[in-house]
C-alpha cells in the first residue's frame, strides 16, 4: 500500500453574524499550522447561496490560502462542474496550479441544490450531461493547443487555454460522489472516486463493490494510487467527550445539509441527515480518544483500501482554539499511531 496521506478540509463556513475578516485570519492560522505539522493537502469546498451559513468562495480562498501553506497541495473539493462554463474553469484552475507550483488536485462533482442549479440557469436533470461535457472540454483545453467542441450549453471554436497546468498532462482529478451512478462515472472519467463523509461505512462497503466493478469495466485493474476518503473527526479523552464537544457545531452543519437536501441524493437506506445526533454519528464519523480514532482509521484502511484521508475538523461556530487543538492532536498522536498500526 502507498504511504498514507492525511489532509485538512477547511470548510470556510461560519454562522450568520460572524465577522468573516476574523474568520479568514483564523483560516490562515489553520493553514500555517497544517503546513507546519506536515498535513499533505488543504482542501476547500464550494457552495453558492449558503444560507444559513456564511461561506468563503472556493477560488479566491484557494488562491490566497496557498501563500500560507507553501508545502501543501491544494484541492478544489469540489467544483460544482454542471454550473460552470468549461473555458472559465480550465483557465482559472490552470492558473491556480501554476501559481501553487503544480500542487492542485482538481475535485469535481455534480451538486444537488435546486437554488444553485436555478441561479445558474440549469437543472438537476441536465447535471450529469453537463458534468461530462464540461469535464471533457476542460481536459482537452488543458492538453490541446486549440479546441473545437460543441456542448449543450457552450461552443468552443478554436478556443484555447494558453496557460497550461504546471502538472503535465493535467492535475489529478477526483470525483466526489454519493450515488452509485456517480461512483460509476468516477471510475470512468477520473483518477479517483473521492469517498464522501456523509454515507455510513456499511453503505460505503456496498459502494466499494460498485466502484471496483466499474473500474474493471473500464479496464482499470487496481484501486487508485491516491485513493481519498473524507471523514469528520473529533478527538478527545473519550468517545463520549468527543461527541459532547462536537454536538453543537457538527449538528448545526448537518442540519444545514439536511435543509439543503444533501440526503436526497444519498443512497436509499442512508438518506436521512435529519436523524437524532446519536443516530447521525453512528458508523459515520470518527469520534474518540487518539487510540480509538487511530484504530478506526486503521480499520477503514484495511477494509476499503483508501490511503488518503481528508479530515473535517472545523465546523460552523467552533472556537479556533478547539480547531487548532484537534489539528495538533491528530498530527502528533493519531497519524503516527495509524502508520505504526499498519
Image (tube, rainbow, N blue to C red):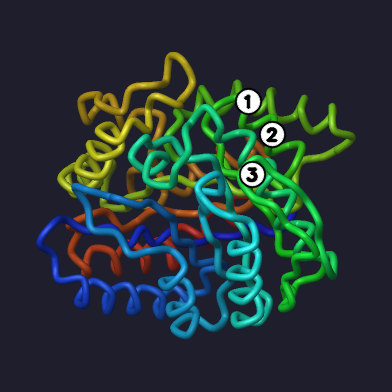
The residue nearer to you, when weighing 318 against 13, is 13
Task: Read off the residue under disc 2.
Answer: 185
The x, y position of residue 104, in whole percent, is 62, 68
* Residue in the picture at 33% in, 79% down: 29
* Residue in the picture at 66% in, 49% down: 134
Where, by quadrant of the figure, is residue 314 drawn? Answer: bottom left
The x, y position of residue 12, in whole percent, is 32, 62
Left or right: 279 as drawn, with respect to 224 = left
The residue nearer to you, when weighing 319 against 66, is 66
Quick one: which residue is furthest to the left in this view? Answer: 17
Which secondary structure lies at badge 2?
helix
Task: Read off the residue under disc 1.
Answer: 181
The x, y position of residue 77, in whole percent, is 51, 55
Q: Alpha carbon of mark 2 to alpha carbon of mark 3: how far? A: 18 Å
How many labels, in total?
3
* Residue in the picture at 55% in, 27% down: 179
Q: Of label 3 and label 1, which has the lower sequence position?
A: 1
Q: Are marks 2 and 3 in contact (CB under 8 Å)?
A: no
Q: Is residue 331 above or below residue 292?
A: below
Task: Read off the residue under disc 3.
Answer: 306
Of tags 3 and 1, the one toward the viewer is 1
Q: Are marks 2 and 1 in contact (CB under 8 Å)?
A: yes
Question: Could one spot residue 20 in this view of the protein?
Answer: yes
Amino acid at each position: 500500500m502507498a504511504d498514507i496521506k492525511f489532509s485538512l478540509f477547511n470548510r470556510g463556513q461560519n454562522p450568520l453574524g460572524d465577522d468573516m475578516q476574523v474568520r479568514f485570519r483564523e483560516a490562515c492560522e489553520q493553514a500555517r499550522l497544517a503546513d507546519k505539522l506536515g498535513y499533505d493537502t488543504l482542501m476547500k469546498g464550494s457552495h453558492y447561496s449558503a444560507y444559513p451559513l456564511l461561506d468563503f468562495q472556493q477560488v479566491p480562498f484557494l488562491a490566497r490560502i496557498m501563500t500560507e501553506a507553501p508545502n501543501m497541495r491544494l484541492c478544489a473539493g469540489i467544483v460544482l462542474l454542471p454550473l460552470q462554463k468549461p473555458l472559465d474553469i480550465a483557465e482559472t484552475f490552470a492558473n491556480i496550479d501554476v501559481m501553487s507550483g503544480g500542487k492542485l488536485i482538481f475535485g469535481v462533482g455534480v451538486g444537488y441544490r435546486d437554488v444553485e442549479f436555478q441561479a445558474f440557469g440549469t437543472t438537476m436533470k441536465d447535471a450529469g450531461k453537463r458534468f461530462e461535457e464540461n469535464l471533457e472540454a476542460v481536459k482537452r483545453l488543458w492538453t490541446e493547443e486549440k479546441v473545437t467542441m460543441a456542448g449543450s450549453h457552450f461552443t468552443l471554436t478554436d478556443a484555447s487555454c494558453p496557460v497550461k497546468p504546471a502538472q503535465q498532462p493535467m492535475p489529478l482529478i477526483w470525483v466526489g460522489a454519493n450515488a452509485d451512478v456517480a461512483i460509476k462515472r468516477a471510475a470512468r472519467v477520473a483518477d479517483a472516486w473521492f469517498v464522501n463523509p456523509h454515507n455510513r461505512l456499511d453503505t460505503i462497503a456496498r459502494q466499494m463493490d460498485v466502484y471496483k466493478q466499474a473500474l474493471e469495466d473500464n479496464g482499470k485493474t487496481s484501486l487508485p494510487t491516491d485513493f481519498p476518503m473524507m471523514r469528520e473527526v473529533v478527538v478527545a479523552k473519550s468517545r463520549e467527550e468527543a461527541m459532547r464537544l462536537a454536538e453543537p457545531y457538527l449538528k448545526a452543519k448537518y442540519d444545514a445539509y439536511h435543509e439543503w437536501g444533501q440526503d436526497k441524493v444519498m443512497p436509499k437506506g442512508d438518506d436521512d441527515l435529519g436523524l437524532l445526533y446519536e443516530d447521525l454519528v453512528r458508523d459515520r464519523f470518527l469520534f474518540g480518544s487518539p487510540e480509538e480514532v487511530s484504530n478506526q482509521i486503521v480499520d477503514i484502511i484495511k477494509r476499503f483500501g483508501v490511503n488518503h484521508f481528508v479530515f473535517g475538523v472545523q465546523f460552523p461556530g467552533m472556537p479556533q482554539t478547539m480547531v487548532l487543538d484537534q489539528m495538533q492532536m491528530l498530527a502528533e498522536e493519531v497519524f503516527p499511531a495509524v502508520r505504526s498500526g499498519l
